[in-house]
Structure formats: structure tokens, C-alpha cells
Amino acid sequence: MSKWKEYLLADVAVINARSINKDFAYSQIEYIDTASVTQNRFEASQIIELKDAPSRAKRLVAKGDTIISTVRPNQKHYGFITDSKPNTVVSTGFAVVTPKEIDPKFLYYFLSQEKIVQHLNTLAESGSTTFPAIRPEVLEDLVVYAPESSEEQTAIAEILSSLDDKIELNNQINKNLEALAQALFKQWFVDFDFPDENGQPYKSSGGEMVESELGMIPKGWRLVKVSDLAPKLETGKRPKGGVKGIEQGIPSVGAESIKGLGYFDFSKTKFVSDEYAQTMNRGWIKGFELLIYKDGGKPGTFIPNFGMFGEGFPFSEFVINEHIFSLDFSEKEFNCFSYFFFDSHYVRPILANSGGKAAIPGINQGDINNLKMFDPQNQLVKLFGVVAKSVISNLLNNCKENRHLSELRDRILPKLITGELKV
């Protein structure tokens, strides 16, 4: 085993080495803002014209760089650049750390340790800015503890990377699963090219269509109001005064977590006390209920969002607060069909219009109950429900595995990165 040594970050890396200047040769940039990166999970970047780019779009990145948000570091907007183009640019809200005398991935894992994140947050809070932030040059004095052997640095990074690679593989599988289900929904319930009795695409081969409240639909298909199906439609609640300071109990999920399938930010988990939870006669989630973003947003604008949890993800037992609707048709397969139906052109614009009209943007139970849906007795609806249930179940199980892998990585990371656990 090699010796371990303390370095200043400035000795092993360069902070903000490259920025757009007058010699920049591209008219377009691939732009990454702080909001699109959390704990090395990147949402889609933006391709924008350089002339239209925000003033903060300045810092160039390259493969092997680590990016760390200098504003509110405890929100964990950090990531490792595995690939980039010559015109990939990040916000000045990031510090770009370019390694020069250290394994790039080892450095990323060192900087992503919880104790380093909290140390940076302490430095940020000691400043005088409106939002807790650190000056990039402060990073240069950060002490990095690393083995002198580059081979040992790489070996440590590879162990941690193997866990992150499996997490990323699961994330990609989940994207593919959801994309396949969305494509099937569109083929059957938007384009109506499901196989007819002769195995031909119904609409394209001349199947008869009739007018309905949802537009043109296949002849013989029946629509029903949500209220006619007598679903369980309810919100949860939180105690008067909120949940600040409650560190344990029953997890309480809010509207910020209703962002599609498989999304949950565990760093923002909130709780209600066990005693309060026992008084709740509504808002308990058993799994596979359709969860609907209920209220919030800028005046005049309401953006509907939907979610679904289950299979022990994100928790085996939890409740929702008053900003979420839980819609349960008492059949998981039809609930799963409903997720894709609500997350489509059939429902999104209706709820967006209704919610945007309210003085405080949001929707009510009547907005949900008055929606028209395809009859759950429709055999194609039933078949799709079975497929959708399988897709969502697999997706949520992958999310649960990712949670376990993340916890394992976070437990061994500080032990590996300080030499306590040898490789």
C-alpha cells in the first residue's frame, strides 16, 4: 500500500480553467445549469444559440472535470463530466475542477463526500451574500487527502464507480421501460393503431372512428367520468406549523416529489411524528395509487405533474401532504393505465387550463372527478394495464435497488477515501 498525503486542491487541480472568450468558435452551446444536476444525476442539457445564452453560461468543461455548485452546496448540485463536446458550457453557479496531478474520478469522489459538502456549506453560510455561496478561490485551499500512488487512487475510484455504473444502468433501463410504455400507449390510445381482428392496425386499415368528448375514437368504445368509477380521491395533511425540526417518524411526501416515475430526492425527506401519523385518516399510500400535483406555481400558470410509488420505493410506509391528490381505482392495473392516460394530451391541457384560472394556481376534486376516461372494461385498456403494471413494478424495483446501492456507496466512500478501508 502506498503512503497517503495531504494536498491543497490547488496543487492537484485547476479551478475554472476554461471560459468562453473572443476566440470561441461555436455559435451554439450545450448548456448545463445548476438546476439540472443533483448528486451526479444529469437532466437533459439545453442546446441554445450563444447569442441567446444567459450571462451565466460561461464556463467550459471537458471529460474528467468535476462540477460543484458554489451556491447552497448542501443541495448537492455536483457531478462528474464523463463526456463533453468542445462547446459544452456550464453556469457560473458551478466551480469547474480540472484535475492535473490526481485521478479524476478519485477527486470527484473525494469532493462528493458528505463531510466535504457540509464543510463547503459552512463556508458558504459564513459569507455575507443573500444566498449561501462560496467564492471559487476558497476551493483552492481545500485539503485533499489521497494515496501517493496513482494506481491506488484509480483502484479506489473503480470500486465506487462500479456502484455508480450499476445505478446509471438501472436509470437507463428505467428510461427505456417508460419510453416503451409511452410508445405503446400512443399506438393504441392516441393513434388507435392497435391490432384489429385480422392483425392489422385498426385506424390505418380503415377502422371506423366516431366523434367523442376526447376527439375521434374507435366505434364502440365507451367513455366514463372519473366520478362514475367511484375512486378513492383524497389528499394528506401535515400538522399545523409544519414539519420543520421533525427528524424521524413517518415519511411525509410533498408535491416537490411528484415529477414522474421513479423520482424521489432522499436528501429532502420530511417526516410527521408517529403520534401525528396515527391521527391521519387519509393520505396513507399503499402503493400504485396515481399521485397528482395539486397546487402551486406562478399566478396564471399551472403545470400538471403525476407520479406513482410502490414496491417499497421510496419507503415501505409513508403519507402524503395536502398538496397532493391520491387517486385510487382499487385496481393497480387500471391505476397504472391511468398514469399514462393522465400524463397525455387527454388530461394535461384540461388540468393546466383549470389550474391556471384559480387565484392560487391549482386544481380541486371536481376537476379530477369530471374528467372523461376510456372505460376500464375495455379489453385493450385491461391489457395495457397489465403491461403498464409490469413496467412500473420493474421500474420501481430498480429504483429501490438504486437506493440500496447509493447507501452502500455512501457508507464505504469515506472509509475508502481516507484509507480506513484498504484496497
Image (cartoon, rainbow, N blue to C red):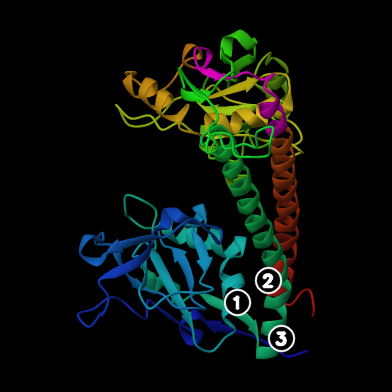
Specify the quadrant that holds the C terminus. Answer: bottom right
Q: Nearer the viewer, residue 35 or 187?
A: 187
Give the left or right position of residue 219, taking residue 46 as reference: right
Tag 1 near tag 2, CB within 8 Å: yes
Lower position in the chain sequence, tag 1 or tag 3: 1
Residue interval drawn in magenta: 368-385
Asked which secondary structure carries label 1, the reply is helix
How far is the residue under mark 1 from the one under mark 2? 8 Å
Q: Position of residue 103 (x, y in %)?
A: 60, 84
- Residue labelled with disc 1: 105
How far is the residue under mark 1 from the one under mark 3? 12 Å
Q: Position of residue 411 (x, y in %)?
A: 74, 61
Asked which secondary structure carries label 2, the reply is helix
- Residue labelled with disc 2: 161
Lower position in the chain sequence, tag 1 or tag 2: 1
How far is the residue under mark 2 from the one under mark 3? 14 Å
Give the left or right position of residue 295, taking residue 412 as reference: left
Of tags 2 and 3, the one toward the viewer is: 2
- Residue labelled with disc 3: 152
Residue at 73% across / 47% down in the picture? 400
